[in-house]
Image (tube, rainbow, N blue to C red):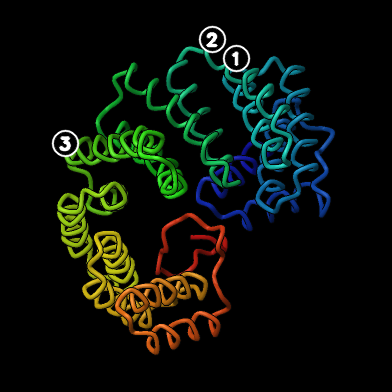
Amino acid sequence: MASAKLEAAEAAVDADDLEGAAEILTAIGGESWTVPEGWPAEERARFLVIAGGLELARAEFDDAIDAYRSALELQEEADAPAVDRGHTWVRLAVAHADAGDEEEAEATFQRGLSILEETEDASSNAIEAWLDYGFVWQQNADFARAAKAFREAVTRAEAANEEPRELGRIHTIYGMALRPLVSIVDALDEADRAPIVAEARNAFGQAVELLQKAQVPPEELLEAVRGLAEVHARSGAHDEARAAHELALRIAEMTGPDPAVLATLAFERGCALQLAGDHTSACAEIEHAIGLADEAETPPAALARAWNALAESFDALGRGADAAKARARVTDLGGIDDDSVDMVDLQPEKDDGGF
């Protein structure tokens, strides 16, 4: 009975049904998610691992850390498989990272990694660990740490001769961590920014090549092509950026035209035209993007940034009155986050509040 309930909770987590998983834990252990004392140690550990993940999802970091530590004690007691213990150490490292304890996160992660590297499927387990570790730093906007973790995942995946689809996916993840760094280094001297831009271009280029080779569904390819287009635009390779944007549009149309997706692509083309100095065309593209976004449930903050970009091109063209009107729309929408380095995504907010 216990195993069946835990399997149901784990399945709910895998399906991103965190509310469903929480309901199962509540049915088992009450509102405080108390671990049943009569259960075997291994099943109590599984309960706590699930609870730790749910505590992380609702930003209760200390509770998550306590749950994972207790799970590790029970796994040791039950002589659980090394792969289970290793991944629990990695989850604990993620909790420490979310709590802001970088030193403890690194030490804990290395302990988990050392265990996973001794397992039967050491390569796959280590790659999974590096990806999980990279994601937490990415979520906390520490893009340099995230890129370092994802670079390690890429290196290990290449050494393991992973299938093109999986390797392309990991290259895309790496590129997505580098993408904000490309934005940040725009102000650096060319000698300082060139290696980062080249690395991002290579990550996305490799991803596109591998995913095309694997003949993945169009939606799996789109993110890599979008990233490649942006990096080309920011590095001044405007012809290559235009070609990548055209490919992204063809891919999007293959998936069934979605106004939100098309709005995002139009906005990205507009930003690329701004970087190329073609503000007349940039205005047309960004206005087109805003029009498409009106058909979708676009997050106000994202839409505000699109209006702000439009105002910048109006300024460049000497259209002060139009720029003022655009900035009034920015204010109406609640303003923009000047510290944000991510590309605007003119798509509806996901259930978890992010995009």
**Secondary element at tag 2:** loop
Label 1: which residue? 115
Q: Residue at x 34, y 79 (%)?
A: 314
Q: Nearer the viewer, mark 3 or mark 2?
A: 3
Q: Position of residue 133 (x, y in %)?
A: 56, 33
Q: Quadrant of residue 92?
A: top right
Q: Residue at x 29, y 36 (%)?
A: 168
Q: Position of residue 137 (x, y in %)?
A: 57, 40
Q: Quadrant of residue 270?
A: bottom left
Residue type of the residue flagged with mark 3: Lys
Q: Position of residue 37 (x, y in %)?
A: 84, 34
Are discs 1 and 2 less than 8 Å apart at CB?
yes
Label 3 vs 1, first from the N-terminus: 1
Closer to the camera in the image, 77 or 182: 182
Give the spatial CA distance, label 3 vs label 1: 34 Å
* Disc on res. 249: none
Label 2: which residue? 118
Residue type of the residue flagged with mark 1: Ile
Q: Is residue 123 above or below residue 266?
A: above
